[in-house]
Image: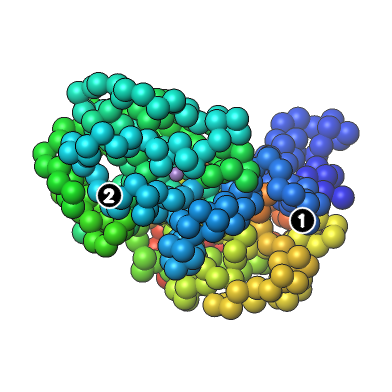
Amino acid sequence: MSVTAVAGTAAPGKAERGTAAPGTAVAGTVERGTAALGTVERGMALVGKAPGKAAPGKAAAAERSVGKTAAGTGAAGKGARRGGDGSRADGSGGGGGEGAGGGKGRVSRRKSGGRDPLATYRGMRDPERTPEPVPAAGPLPEGNDDTFVIQEHHARSLHWDVRLERDGVLVSWAVPKGLPLNPKENRLAVHTEDHPIDYGSFEGDIPAGEYGGGKVILWDRGRYEMEEWTDREVKVVFHGNRAEGRYVFFQTRGSDWMVHRMDGPPFPDWQPVPTELTPMTATKGPLPSGGRRQWAYELAWAGNRILVAVEGGRIRVRDEKGRDVSAAYPELRAMGAELGSTVCLLDGEVVALGKDGRPDPSLLRRRPARQAAPGAKDLREVPITFLAFDLLHLDGRDLIGRPYEERRAALETLGLEGDRWGVAPAVPGTGRDALKVAHGLGLNGVVAKRRRSLYRSGVTTADWILTAD
Ligand code: MN
């Protein structure tokens, strides 16, 4: 039985009682909210089979085989040396061209003496097997050297490919976490093979097993101004819809470069994602008096409380004491990739669902919840699901000083819906309605949250009341 079904049957005052909105609305909301839970079962059914639809899984498979392919071309040495750095996965790393083509790490070819700058690119792709443009050798198009494209590439490891039009090609870097917005942060940018100008409009799926297999999304396109361009340093100003401002790319070693934002923060009160927050917790007590205009109700999940910071498509998970427990929940890495360039801090709980589809705390206790990474057996036997119920930061703005209902509305705009994660359902109606829904799900409590209340890190607050029976 799926959790969705449980939620449906659990809902009080459903159609058969002939009562109107409240009960049905509860059922509907809970069903929407628990759709993510229902999908866990489908997710489990896929274990052991070839990855199917979702880009991250597919990309993972693709890049594993890409790694093997690269080993044959000689590009792999670098990939292997760097270990888990996925930016190499699509052959970023100067590709197989080293040795033959010369010009390792070079980004300027005005004196290239007639060498075909796209030879490396073509040598890595079979036009019969990839939808990417693979133009025949010939004269390069002439342009104004003032356009750029940034592609979000869900290869084995997510990265953003930043490409600048220059001398008839797109000079390219693979940036694992994307362009930084924080002027204090340098990010790795791996110089990769020049791409054809036509690549600037490419998006689509590179088949698994092909070079760079995975989904490519056009993240931004626009114009750039070049301020300085040498073999070791490139200063530009991006004028895109998303990429905006002065950046410098500078070479550190071989194909390894860094990218740095030279402008100030993107807007005046911009903040980096907070790292020091710990969860606000509820006071135990009876259902509060005061109507539904004052109080909103959620279910008490009896799971593991975590805060999940997402940046550059990567997640960092902290427990209620602020300890880094990222390794304990590898299932959530795909949530980071799915959020792409969204920067946020999520508050919520990890639950484990039993065979009946209901949260099962005793099952969850079998999973390591600390620093230790779970083994294959844990992953298989105790799959976890993350239910987000609060949003403390979004894209440079701290939300802890905003009222609960505003944070909750912002959370619901994120479209968090995966096999292993989702938004915890809000239960409309009264506290009694919420308790009935909770009991139907096998949970023993609800949390009342004062709609106007702010988030106070590390505080046990009377603005959140846990009612259990
Ligand atoms: Mn790429």
Q: Is residue 75 above or below residue 35?
A: below
The quarter of the picture showing ligand 1: top left
What's the image's color scheme? Answer: rainbow
Residue 290: percent from left, percent from top: 55, 50
- Judged left or right of residue 67, residue 193 is left
| 1 or 2: mark nearer the eye | 2
Question: Which residue is under mark 2?
Answer: 103
The response on whether ligand 1 sits within 8 Å of label 1 is: no
Question: Which residue is under mark 1?
Answer: 47
Observer able to see residue 358: yes
**Is 216 in front, or is 290?**
216
Which image quarter: residue 53?
top right
Residue 104: percent from left, percent from top: 30, 53
Residue drawn at x 72%, y 62% is: 383
Estimate how packed mark 1 is, as few (under 14), some (14 to 19) or many (20 or more) residues with alpha carbons within 10 Å.
few
Residue drawn at x 72%, y 37% is: 28
